[in-house]
Amino acid sequence: LRAENPEVMVFKNAVFELPEIRNFADPDQLTLFFGAINRSDDWAPLMPGLNEVARAVGKRLRFSVVHDKAFFDALETPHKIFTPMCAYSRYLNLLGQAEIAFMPLADNIFNRAKSDLKFIEASACRVISLASDVAYGQSIIENKNGLVFRSSMELRAHLLRVLAYPEAARKIADAARLYVMQERMLAYQTIERIAWYRSLWDRREALNTALRARVPTLFTS
């Protein structure tokens, strides 16, 4: 982007606050949360593995799906609930009631450019991330603050392990929440963000001159 606009600053994804913990109350029943838009190409190859696990464990695994009706319909289990497109606060509320956050991304140029926001959101809620290596592999420390899969077989193995050892899964989710608390709170970026915004204001005349040179049509009436 700096080739088009040299005044670009990148800040890591962060959260305003840590939500109240509301999950892992019943080790005999865990909920997998999936909420996304335009992800059918990412989850379709993994659906057989999800359904295999769902059939094997029955009511021990529930699904909470936001927006993606095709994903919901493809789940071969009665233990599922669907929520249409909703407010962000509702989305976070549903996420926080789950124990597992499913984050599938196929390996392509578009997905490689995605951020780790969903991992940060889930971790803040003490929800264990079950995520693809694409986009999340550099943020998640395997078996420490999340679980990463690179194939349907790995996804299946991770999910079965979480269901078999919910206490171990909770400890991973605790570690993920601690990571967010220590490193990914928006408050920690306040000084840096203010300094950048002030630098833009202090240099506004020079920046406007440079912008006029780059895109003169913006200044024509």
Image: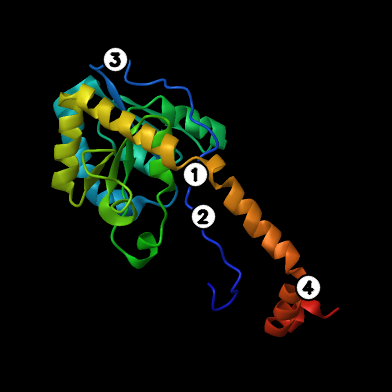
Label 2: few (<14), some or many (≥20) within 10 Å?
A: few
The mark found on residue 6 in the picture is: none
Name the foreground residue: 167 vs 151. 167
| Number of residues whose C-alpha sits closer than 10 Å to that of mark 3, classed few (under 14), some (14–19) or many (20 or more) | few
Tell me if 119 is positioned left or right of 204 in this view: left
Pinpoint residue 105: horizontal percent, then vertical percent: 32, 53
Give me the residue at 71% from left, 73% from top: 207
Total residue callouts:
4
- Name the front one of labels 1 and 3: 1
Task: Tell me if residue 5 comes above or below residue 131 in the rendering.
Answer: below
Q: CA distance from mark 2 to mark 4?
A: 25 Å
- Residue at 41%, 57% (x, y): give it: 114
Q: Marks 1/2: CA distance? A: 8 Å
The residue where tag 2 is placed is 11
Q: Which residue is mark 3?
A: 26
* Residue on which the image places disc 1: 14
Q: Are marks 1 and 2 in contact (CB under 8 Å)?
A: yes
Neighbours of disc 4 within 10 Å: few (<14), some (14-19), many (20+): few
Q: CA distance from mark 1 to mark 3?
A: 29 Å
Q: Are marks 2 and 3 in contact (CB under 8 Å)?
A: no
Q: Which of the two discs, 4 and 3, labels the residue nearer the N terminus? A: 3
Distance between mark 4 and mark 1 Cα atoms: 31 Å
- Please name which of the two marks, 4 or 3, marks the residue nearer to the observer: 4
In which quarter of the view is residue 48 placed?
top left
Amino acid type at image mark 1: Ala
**Which amino acid type is marked by label 4?**
Glu
Residue occupied by mark 4 = 205
> Is residue 45 or residue 18 the one in the foreground?
18
- Whether pointer 1 and pointer 3 mark residues with C-beta atoms closer than 8 Å, the reply is no
